[in-house]
Image: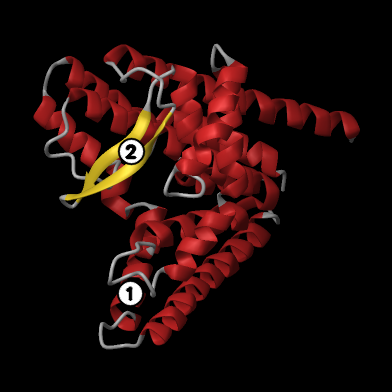
Amino acid sequence: MDNYLIILGAILIDIIFGWPNIIFRAIGHPVTWIGKLINFLDKKLNNASYSNKIKKINGLATLLICSLLVIIISILIEEFLNQFYFGILISMIIMWPLIAINSMYQHVKNILIKIQDNNINLARKSVSKIVGRNTSKLNKINLIRASIESLGENTSDGIIAPIFWGLLFGLPGIALYKTINTLDSMIGYKNKKYKDFGWAAARVDDLVNIIPSRITGILYAIVSNNFFFTISIMFKDGHKHVSPNAGYPESAIAGALNIKLSGPRFYKNLKRNDPWLNEKGSDPSVKKLKKAIMLYKRIVVLIITIIVLLLILKLDVL
């Protein structure tokens, strides 16, 4: 089946409907299904009494079990749907929840509304849903900063990366990516519990995000008002981030808005002195958060345009 057409359809469905609460309450979400399997394996295989070596082996086994299971199921579904003329439509519906365009937009938009209404405590709760740091004491500027950072990183993780792997390998590609990304978000931490058990998931997640994260940064530069400045900030500061990938889209959005992002922050009351991205930029403001959302919308339009052009080119070749 045509991956370009299926991904385009899934994007449009997600933009229009998101993932409605009524569906979530009824059946959950594919990521939560994967999460339940990961949680089960975590409880069974990540025993505190095991040696570091055994934890690493078990972590690798967890990665392989989840990945192989998802790949096999995805291939079987894709092969089954290939037999029917309406298979493309069903494939669009299956891929729909794996692209998080609408949900990310709604999260950040809700944060913007709460900040504009000076509901700082509610804004802190909303921001805590999309970042890993302690938000209980964040002021207005740092809430906006955290929101823009999350928007930049999740443009890559939640949109560009799944679309990229889906375009290349169809349902198995996008489903495997979401599995790896979910594994990393659940067990890919460097704390005592997951340092060894989650090492494989964290490394593979780094690998599958290398290209999408750079593409995301370039897209932010394209939709910005200053392409060359944004690109320069991305390549100057992208590698400074603690993550080998998140720094590129975050640096790009920092350059596009000419604000400084990252910097010192608290994780579970422990201060982490991360370097600034675009250190000479101004502090973020409500106006900059609005512009960040606008840039995000532009990227979505640009992605749709690119996929449509690829479809047209493909049809011309045929």
Indicate which disc residue 266 carries: none
Provide residue 129's location: percent of width, then percent of height: 25, 42
Whether 106 is drawn above or below 97: the answer is: above
- From the viewer's perspective, tell me whether residue 209 is left or right of residue 190: right
Separation of residues labelled 1 and 2 (CA atoms): 29 Å
Indicate which disc residue 20 carries: 2
Nearer-N-terminus badge (1/2): 2
Disc 1: which residue: 42
Provide residue 262's location: percent of width, then percent of height: 35, 35
Q: Secondary structure at mark 2?
A: loop
Residue 103 seen by the camera: no
Residue 36 seen by the camera: yes
Type of residue at label 2?
Pro
Decide which of 106, 272 is in the foreground and name it: 272
Looking at the rendered image, the disc whose residue lies closer to the viewer, 1 or 2, is 1
Provide residue 36's location: percent of width, then percent of height: 33, 66
Residue pictured at 48% horizontal, 22% vertical: 255
Type of residue at label 1?
Asp
Q: Secondary structure at mark 1?
A: helix
- Write down the quadrant of residue 288 in the picture: top left
Q: Quadrant of the C terminus?
A: top right
Whether 74 is drawn above or below 52: the answer is: above
| Count of picture labels | 2
Residue pictured at 19% horizontal, 44% vertical: 134
Q: How is the image coloured?
A: secondary structure
Decide which of 258, 109 is in the foreground and name it: 258
